[in-house]
Image (cartoon, rainbow, N blue to C red):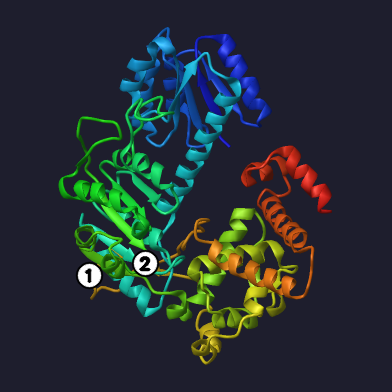
Amino acid sequence: MKPIWIVDDDQSIRFVLEKALLRENLPTRSFVSPREVLAALESADADDGPQVLVSDIRMPGGSGLDLLGKVKEKLPGLPVIIMTAFSDLDSAVSAFQGGAFEYLPKPFDLPRAVELIHRAVEESQREEVAEERMAAAPEMLGQAPAMQDVFRAIGRLSQSNVTVLITGESGSGKELVARALHKHSPRASGPFVAINTAAIPKDLLESELFGHERGAFTGAQTMRRGRFEQADGGTLFLDEIGDMPFDLQTRLLRVLSDGSFYRVGGHSAVKSNVRVIAATHQDLEQRVKEGSFREDLFHRLNVIRLRLPRLTDRREDIPMLTRHFLQQSARQLGVEPKRISDAAVARLGQFHFPGNVRQLENICHWLTVMAPAQVIELKDLPPEVLGSAPAPAAVASAAMQVSATTEPAVVADPQAVAGDPAPAMQTPVSAVTADLTGAGEVWEHALEREAHDLLAAGREDVWDVLTRRFETSLIQAALGCTRGRRIEAAQKLGIGRNTITRKIQELGLE
């Protein structure tokens, strides 16, 4: 990981932060003045730059706020934390509201400072992953006619700013399509900001979308920009729009109508130049009839609709997707890619995949960790695949799919397919990414079935049995991702170092 850069002319502040971050295994690099930071940025390459910048405001030889502006010009995605004395707070908030990740009032509580820096590191890493996905390769994998239709639509919309509504089942790749629409639009140089409206509590969603003023409610210690402001000049992706609370739909309609809104607790309208792409797995027409979704908002969103196919509607893509995801998982885990036998691929081709492409990706990740040999055989497939009845429509074509997809996976470039007569450019690809918010549908159903079977058998230790298996799987997966590094695995799981050590001992995972 790249180091945390600390900028402060006070040696004691630098020393305290350095030692605290060192205990958290976070590397640091310290500077006395903004001038030193700017010089270091000029000479640093992509791997030597900062993961997070923590800067004081008042320093000899330059202001931390001036430094913020210059750093944001060079590294717009870098989280910057501003340290400020309480006497500077009002001017600091108004001055850096357009760019700082957060502020840290002095004198600060050290654990709170470390926690804030951890959050900034996570945000920075998410940005890096998103940028890699955006820049790495064409967006989606698929040779099935249904996916080729999607590629053509992306190509035709590539120079448009029109609002798009993406529909499809959970796990079918709606966010990936939204990112492709952004990447190939005139707004590609602007930010892509995504928010899952179903994952945020109703009382927080308004502030997340529109921001809030300082003092707007208990705990609002500073002004905060919402997602609409963060996405200014770029694209805002509203996932699961069908779950948005009815009263917030009215506010969203106003923004779509005239491009202005008010922060929570604010009295001045804020203008925002944002392209909105919305997505849902629900039937919005039915929700309109039920009165739970505004009809005028539906028509405002439904300018262009893209319908994504289920994975079972594009079974011919399953073999190439499987091999691609196995390669991808191996890169993520730093291991040798596993191969998969034709019999195992054929069985996957017969599975009904309620979780769509996301479920297939999760299965491939599971196989990379859990399959005992370098070649994945039929018996190595997870229980939900082996224990399910083959989908009727898949049985006849399974063997054909296996033999027809031995070539490396390719995808049609949306820019090339915009003009249909020209042949699509063939390029290696990355595919639909894992999204924890939707992965639950598959394993939760399997968990329910397992619990039902154990209860029906008269077991009285169901809680202990399933909890032990659940914790074992979580810890083994995390240790696999971190190559056995316990502290890093604990951080990824969101638990303490002592907790993971104790659990490893209790579960016999030594």
Quadrant of the image for the N terminus? top right
- Tag 1: residue type? Gly
Is residue 489 visible in this depiction of the protein? yes
- Give the residue pinned by disc 1: 419
User: Along the line of sight, which residue is nearer the eye, 340 or 205?
Assistant: 205
User: Along the line of sight, which residue is nearer the eye, 474 or 295?
Assistant: 295
User: Along the line of sight, which residue is nearer the eye, 364 or 239?
Assistant: 239
The percent position of residue 489, horizontal first and vertical second, equals: 68, 45
Q: Secondary structure at mark 2?
A: loop
In the displayed structure, 298 sits above or below 73; it is: below
Residue drawn at (73%, 43%), measured in percent from left and top?
A: 486
Q: Residue furthest left?
A: 258
In the displayed structure, 431 sits above or below 456; it is: above
- Give the residue pinned by disc 2: 282
Which badge, 1 or 2, comes first in the chain's sequence? 2
Callout 2: 10 Å neighbours few (<14), some, many (20+)? Answer: some
The percent position of residue 91, horizontal first and vertical second, equals: 33, 16
Q: Residue furthest top?
A: 60
Residue drawn at (22%, 51%), measured in percent from left and top?
A: 253
- Tag 2: residue type? Gln
| Image quadrant in which you'd find residue 375 | bottom right
Residue drawn at (45%, 64%), measured in percent from left and top?
A: 428
The percent position of residue 500, horizontal first and vertical second, equals: 74, 44
* Labels 1 & 2 near each other (Cβ < 8 A): no
Is residue 188 visible in this depiction of the protein? no
